[in-house]
Image (cartoon, grey):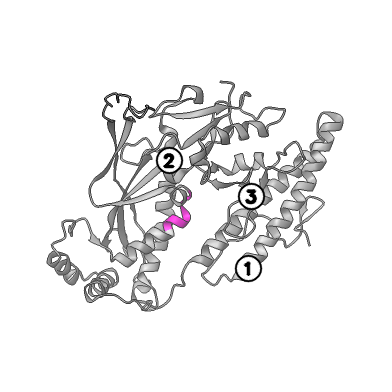
Amino acid sequence: MSAFMNGVPRIGASLKGEPRAPETKSVGAHEVRDAMDEFLSAFDDFKQANDERLDEIEKKLSADVVTEEKVDRINRALDRQKKTVDELALTLARPEIGGEPRLRLDPARREHKRAFDLYVRKGEAQDLRTLEAKALSAQSDPDGGYLVPVETERLIDRIVSDASPIRAIAGVRQIGAASYKKPFTVSGPASGWVGETEARAETSASALSEIEFPAMELYAMPAATSTLLDDAAINIDQWLAEEVQTAFAEQEGTAFVNGDGIRRPRGFLSYAKVTNANWSWGKLGYLATGAAGAFPTSNPADVLIDLIYSVKAGYRANARFVMNRATQSAIRKLKDTDGNYLWQPGIAAGTPPTLLNYPVTEAEDMPSIATDATAIAFGDFKRGYLIVDRLSVRVLRDPYSAKPYVLFYTTKRVGGGVQNFEALKLLKFGTA
């Protein structure tokens, strides 16, 4: 049965009010399937209501206010239900919080894990300090915290990657230094065709330049009660990873899109932008919609097709759209000349929707549609944008600043920036 009745959410439907949020790790696969079924049913209702709106525009050159409100209401509810599906799928994918998992660790890692667990729970740092000194770790710094076990670091990285939209699609490289430097060719060597016996002209050497991605410090400070820390059933690795997830994911999401490169990664929208016809290395090319703060009134799909083909064929195979929820809501109403909707929902929970058969990544830090806003990005983000993670996550236990709570000052070093300016293009909602 549809989650809507005459455009209004049914009493008791999951679209009524705010989306239900997963409360515990006990989310089952059937809940995800049910939520996905409701989402797909709601999308069918949305298409029906939007078809009515388009028919009214075709017949009367404008839609009734009631119809417009109905479409917008279902559209907003559809966004909420999609968020619910994503949250349930993400929760289902996480491991259970329970006893310590059976890990096949070598003795040194097992000892480090035991010492770190003792430090987090009881504040006893002697064993951890001895181990880091014994390992001659260049990053050992008791005043700045202790390195988490490798398994904990991997768990934090995995959970944050699931929640951070740009990290999930970008290229990621781990480094051990303060920055990562990458050379690139400004102009390749001379080349050409010659006959078998013709003289070969001397070729010039490649001109190389270098881009640098420094790793900046990102921190979170989760708090715990002494009761939680004393509970042996709590998996400390999982608890710490989930506590820092939101803070790390939100800060990274903002920086990877809009960061200025000062004490944070540089976002891809912070680079100089030029019309695609005037593109040069070091800048991002854009196409204009031709209408200020809107799609063109006739054949709006054409600008999206032009955006797709502004990217070279080698980057289109793994390309995707990136936009925020408000932009996605506007695009959801668009059709092609054959009456097919351009936007289509994912076929299963956890799979992204598609636009013109390319996946769509929802990043809330992207600008909304407005005059001269570059609200849509398209391209191969794995080759276009690089995230660098400096190895090691650090934790400093603070039982004094917020008594009776224990604070855990958790830091990691992250950098980022555009590594291939050919792979990404933008759509600007303006006239030029």
Mark 3: few/some/many CA within 10 Å (<14, 14-19, 20+): some
The boundaries of the magenta stretch are 160-165
Give the vertical position of 404 relative to 110 (above or below). Answer: above
Tag 3: amino acid: Asp
Q: In which quarter of the image is the N terminus?
A: bottom right
Residue drawn at point x = 47 percent, y = 22 percent: 278
Task: Tell me the residue that label 1 is attached to.
Answer: 31
Examine the image and state in which quarter residue 124 appears: bottom left
Is 190 situated left or right of 115 in this image? right
Residue 194 vertical placement versus 27 (above, below): above
- Residue sitting at x 76%, y 47%: 47
Residue 344 image position (x, y, % from top left): 67, 49
* Residue ID for mark 3: 79
For label 1, the SS is helix
Res. 100 image quadrant = bottom left
Q: How far apart are marks 1 and 3 (CA)?
A: 18 Å
Marker disc for residue 44: none
Give percent across and percent down for residue 417. 37, 39
